[in-house]
Amino acid sequence: MFNFLKKNNEPKKLFYTTDMHCHIIPGVDHGAQTVEDSIALVKAEMEMGISHIIATSHVTKDSFENNPETLAKGFATLKAGLEKAGIDIDIKYSAEYRIDELFKEQLKNNQLVLMPNNYLLVENSFQGETMGLDELLFELQLKDYIPILAHPERYRYYNHQRYQTLHDSGAYFQVNLLSFTGYFGEPEKRTAEWLLDNELIDFLGSDIHFMQHAEILQKFIGTKEYRKIVERIPRLCNDISFN
């Protein structure tokens, strides 16, 4: 299924074609700041074999207080830039929602920008778990939303039992491919590997914000370590439809 015997000068490809976590909409968070930045990131994704992108800008109280209008405006700017550059790629947008008071307000007012098929990317604070997280995840499922917890491997306050409980409750896990490179730290890398060993990874995402991230991934997917991940990753990973 996977051809790892390519010539060294050929671009290395990811084993999946949809990136469902990236920060490429210009000027709405601390990812791409200009259309030129966005185009460079999209080109890098395409070189790695990505043909479908869901742009997931931050929505966070007091820092990136985006809403449906600001996200739509930024996405329109991105689309126009891609069209002008002659880049044809299937691209949609949603958001990465920090579970905070702003999220709860937008949830109450039906202002969430969902992924296709009602998937919803949410993240915890890096300082500690959101109070009442279990109840909130249950509420989301009652509304027929499908919660995906962004980069669970980066929440250092979690233990193995908590990961298992959250996943068993119906929350999908999206792990950053960057975490396997050690970019975020050795604890995050070890946790990503534990999640892989225990078949708790449902999606991989780039979480790229700028070219350094893309360059690290481009180098990583040509390594033996990456090939070992591909051999062990659940075959259903990233196969859930986002069309």
Image: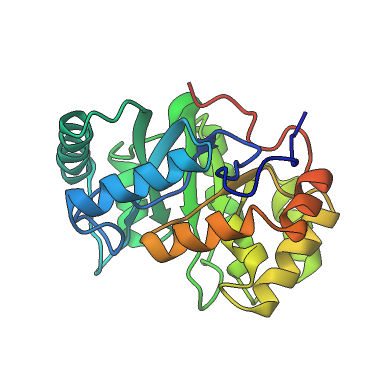
User: Which residue is more in the foreground, 7 or 87?
Assistant: 7
**In the image shown, does 38 or 237 lie closer to the viewer?**
38
Residue 175 position (above or below residue 230)? below
Tell me the residue at 76%/55% (across/down): 165
Q: Where is residue 27 shown, x and y percent of the image?
A: 19, 56
Q: Quadrant of the N terminus?
A: top right
* Way the structure is coloured: rainbow
Q: Position of residue 119 (x, y in %)?
A: 50, 34
Quadrant for residue 93, please give it: top left
Q: Is residue 185 above or below residue 203?
A: below
Inspect this view and state whether residue 151 appears: no
Q: Position of residue 170 (x, y in %)?
A: 68, 42
**Is residue 61 among what the camera can see?**
yes
- Seen from the viewer's position, the closer of residues 54 and 131 is 54
Q: Nearer the viewer, residue 52 or 1?
A: 1
Q: Is residue 90 left or right of residue 39?
A: right
User: Going by the image, does 82 lie left or right of 123?
Assistant: left
102 versus 54 height, above or below: below
Seen in the image, is 40 located left or right of residue 134?
left
Q: Residue at x 43, y 58 (%)?
A: 99
Q: Judge left or right: residue 21 versus residue 27.
A: right
Residue positioned most to the top: 243
Residue 28 position, x and y percent, is 22, 55
When the figure is inspected, residue 22 is found, relative to residue 33, above or below; the finding is: above
Marks counted in the figure total 0
- Residue sitting at x 32%, y 61%: 60
**What residue is at 20 percent from the left and 28 percent from the top?**
83
